[in-house]
Image: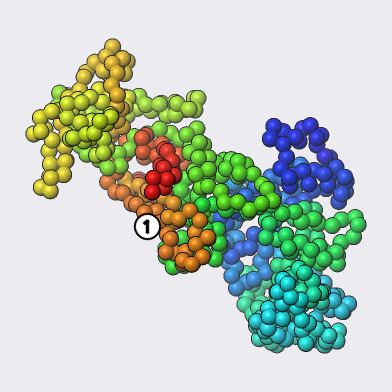
Amino acid sequence: MEVKEEAELNESKGLNFVEEEVYNDLRAGKNGGRLSTRFPPEPNGYLHIGHAKAICMDFGVAEKFGGTCNLRFDDTNPVKEDVEYVDSIREDIHWLGFDWGDREYYASDYFPQLYDLAIRLIKEGKAYVDDQTSEEIAAQKGTPTVPGTESPYRNRSVEENLDLFTRMNAGEFEEGSRVLRAKLDMASSNMHFRDPIMYRIIKYPHHRTGTTWKVYPMYDFAHGQSDYFEGVTHSICTLEFVPHRPLYEHFVKELADETYCPRQIEFNRLNLTYTVMSKRKLLQLVKEGLVAGWDDPRMPTISGMRRRGYTPESVRNFINTIGYTKYEALNSISLLEHAVRDDLNRIATRVMAVVNPVKLVIDNYPEDLVETVTMENNPEQEGSGVHEMPFCREIYIERDDFMENPPKKFFRLAPGTEVRLKGAYIIKASENPEDIERDSEGNITTIHCTYDPESRSGLPGAARKVKGTLHWVSARHAIDGEVRLYDRLFEVENPAAETERDFREMLNPDSLKVVTGVKLEPFIIKESEKGRKFQFQRVGYFTPDYDYTDEKPVFNRTIALKDTWEKVQKKN
């Protein structure tokens, strides 16, 4: 690979520290000037936004420097893995805008080579079979300040270790009864170096290899070797793998030489307020029915964000904003929401929808007349065009947009006041209390008003100004729909820090509100088939849900128009 000129690479924002390391290696001619990265997900759950940060790094750095990035599934634990997860991971990466070409690999591709390497290490006296239980091994490892003690099985003969290991793979022993450990240093200050486990017995069919194997490699043994077998030059991972790096390098050097050796570089994870990133906890939410699946729009999963209506551009912009460092941080979800709001403002089609409707009758408007008014699709997007919207004597407005006894500075509709109906006329609510109709429980059902025929856009009276503008939908043409109003999944800022409480107790009870009987303008239904993102004017940004049908239009609120959460929290 030819290294790009330094001036070309140092763009306005420059290189982050990982990119600088990669660039320096390329400039020094390491690995023959070749760059190959990899994204190595475990197929035991759906990817979340933390994985999105890793995806953007692994694929992005390869893209930036003209290298390649492999997709390699770390399928070393068949008990937790499923083809469903493999398919979802592929879809998520593609949605974010990356592709791995024909470079899709699996750790299981290298099971024969890894097994052969384990046999070699046994023959060289560098590995042994241990009969201790996992609890005994953990206790025997000591603590960070107290050296470990050697296993009573550490000095078995090569012949005995070879015999036991081959019998482990033949299925002669029960799970948990024996493991293969590397013979390193039980007094090392790095706990990971104290005779780490290389193989354990698992008698569960693998989704790719079936029942061929009864022993499976541990991550620390499989990962670096898989990198080497694939020709990966830079193994980029998160900070929790810093103490694993010496072990990564130790195992890799059993294969590598001076001509080529993978290098591990670590960056900080993406931690987000008002959510959890633990795959175990997310799985618990799914299995216990506390959310409606991995793609529930409240989940921090990529599939959940996609269903909610987030755009890949907004996610990538957010990740670029928070950047990559060597220090852990808790990122505000408001930054993510700002990125989503900013992108949707640029691309979303403006439409009318009334979420909590009340009928408004314009008494001096002809009963049989239907006009069409022209609405801009998106004033922020040049060439987005316009669409027509029907207007007639009876319309729906938001119930909250009318008050009988309003406070000061209430610039919406009240008895005797005027407002403009967006794109149409100025109306004035009747001052007569009898012109407000109610049901048997006293709830307002209909509001009567009059309109100014000269105030429509394009007519001389259109220049007359009033303080309030309301959105509306023609009652005769409105289509009933459902909206799902999503909010933050947890009601505390950092659930992970609340160690004395069960994380499920901190779920936000108002994270989902389902509203039926929403009144939609017909254009929304027509355009929903095209997968458009919508701004329901004065309400928020919405996207058609997967459950959407023409008979039952269902929309997810992606994000509100403004961030009101932070203001509410500060008041509290």
Query: Badge 1: how crowded within 10 Å, few (<14), some, or many (20+)?
Result: few
525 horizontally vs 140: left or right: left
| Above or below 424: residue 272 | below
Q: Position of residue 401 (x, y in %)?
A: 26, 35
Q: Is residue 390 visible?
A: no
Q: Residue reaching furthest right?
A: 258
Residue 187, located in which quarter of the rendered image? bottom right
Question: Is residue 262 visible in this depiction of the protein?
Answer: yes
Q: How is the image coloured?
A: rainbow
Q: Quadrant of residue 183?
A: bottom right
Name the residue located 42 percent from the left edge and 29 percent from the top edge.
377
The part of the image, by quadrant, that contains residue 322 is top right
Residue placed farthest to the top in the image? 460
SS under mark 1: loop
Q: Is residue 264 left or right of residue 407?
A: right
Judging depth in this view, the residue of 421 and 324 nearest the camera is: 324
Residue located 50% across and 32% down the image: 346
Q: Position of residue 280 (x, y in %)?
A: 54, 66
Residue type at mark 1 is: Pro
- The residue at which mark 1 appears reads as 509
- Horizontal placement of 266 versus 507: left or right? right
Answer above or below: position of 258 versus 145: above
Residue at horizontal 43 percent and vertical 60 percent from the top: 506
Residue at point 28% right, 11% down? 460
Total number of numbered labels? 1
Q: Residue furthest left?
A: 434
Q: Percent position (x, y) of residue 374? A: 35, 24
Would you place residue 361 above or below residue 27 in this image?
A: above
Q: Quadrant of the N terminus?
A: top right
